Image (cartoon, grey):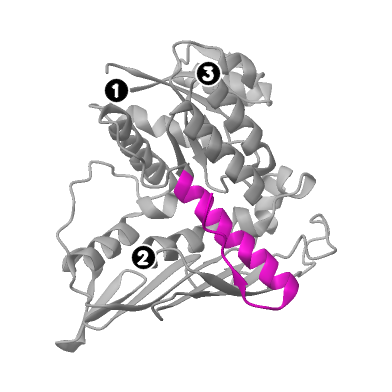
Amino acid sequence: MGKIGVGIIGLGMGKSMFGIQQIPDTDLEIRGICDTDVDRLESIRTEHNVPFATMDYQELLQQDEIDIVGIYTPDPLHAQHCLDALDCGKHIICTKGFVDSLDDAVSVLQKTRETGLKLMVGQTCRFRPDFMHTHRLMESGKLGNIVAAEAHYVHDMRSVLTATPWRHQMPQKTLYGGVCHPMDLIIWFLGFPSAVQAIAHESGIDERYPSGQGYFNDNWMANLIYEDGRLGRVLGLYGICHAPMPMLGLSVYGTAGSVVNGQAIFDDDHRSVIPVEDAVAMAADEIADVGHIGEVVRYMLHFEDCLKHDKQPLINAEVGTKVIAVLDACERSARSGKTERVQSAF
């Protein structure tokens, strides 16, 4: 396989993909872009000298020189955009959120099975250095048996609603578009739960965001139930004034060591707390950016490797669908007030 053409649909978060141009030894080339904002489209086309630009995503999908499509459109559009891209023979990187219903996730999963094409959900947290180091430390066995894990994503969304008005105009479900971050993290560390207990709250903190009937709950807590007794917990708060705490957090508790937000402590010396990167052999990483752009570039390089060596991506369509299934169970649990089983067969 030689050079691999990339097309981007949606140049908000999607413009992060241009970070790949700073990697000298990649075969990924951005050959096409699409956005409904003509000023943004032309500005990015000129800045990066992109050969093809359009306001119609179907036109981009028809370009033979594009092999991978990055889908960074509003969440409610992801399913149709994924299905159309697969029908046009394109591999897909779909930004997190993936889709906002289990039915849509299953439809996309089935289409990937029919076409044999690869899809990766862009769960950026799995490509954030401190979380990657923590996962590597767990896999090394230095934490012993993992007893529990908890993750949070706490983010006052009012400024985000201003910057990206589609989130209140369409609107975005914060469960699928926000809680997916910490949920995917816990699943990465503990695996898929068999059931969940979830509670939710509708804040009404911003009148632009619709309200009513529980569809628009913007604050979530969920306990994850595992058959082997391990404990998982997820917190997602978006209808709040942001607290003096990290926006994203991860804690992993083991019998030989534990990690909280990138700081590790081990059973043989409770007095010494060390950065997790000092506790584990670090993998080579040529990416200087430690923010969203670096995370996106890392998963692009991972996807490139999967295409070249015919491997499944870390978060493929099946994993992405199972994450949506857990969120679906949370939605049902918050509505029923009961523990709900997670659908596992697709």
Q: Secondary structure at mark 1?
A: loop
Disc 1 vs disc 3: Cβ atoms closer than 8 Å? no
Where residue 44 appears, x then y in whole percent? 53, 23
Snapshot quadrant of residue 327: bottom right
Q: Is residue 65 left or right of residue 338?
A: left
Magenta span contains residue 344: yes
Q: Nearer the viewer, residue 167 or 256?
A: 256
Q: Is residue 48 left or right of residue 34?
A: left
Real-space Cα separation, disc 3 to disc 2, in angstroms: 39 Å
Q: Secondary structure at mark 3?
A: helix
Q: Is residue 236 above or below residue 9?
A: below
- From the image, state whether disc 2 or disc 1 is nearer to you: 2
Does residue 101 appear in the picture of this structure?
yes
- From the image, state whether disc 3 or disc 2 is nearer to you: 2
Q: Quadrant of the N terminus?
A: top left
Instruction: Tell me which segment is drawn in magenta.
Output: 318-346
Snapshot quadrant of residue 311: top left
Report which residue position mark 1 lands on.
Answer: 27
Residue located farthest toward the front when viewing the structure as drawn: 345
Q: Is residue 59 above or below residue 133?
A: above
Q: Amino acid at mark 3?
A: Arg
Disc 3 vs disc 2: Cβ atoms closer than 8 Å? no
Q: Is residue 109 left or right of residue 286?
A: right
Where residue 4 appears, x then y in whole percent? 35, 20
Real-space Cα separation, disc 2 to disc 1, in angstroms: 31 Å
Report which residue position mark 3 lands on.
Answer: 45
- From the image, state whether disc 1 or disc 3 is nearer to you: 1
**The disc label shown at residue 189, or none:** 2
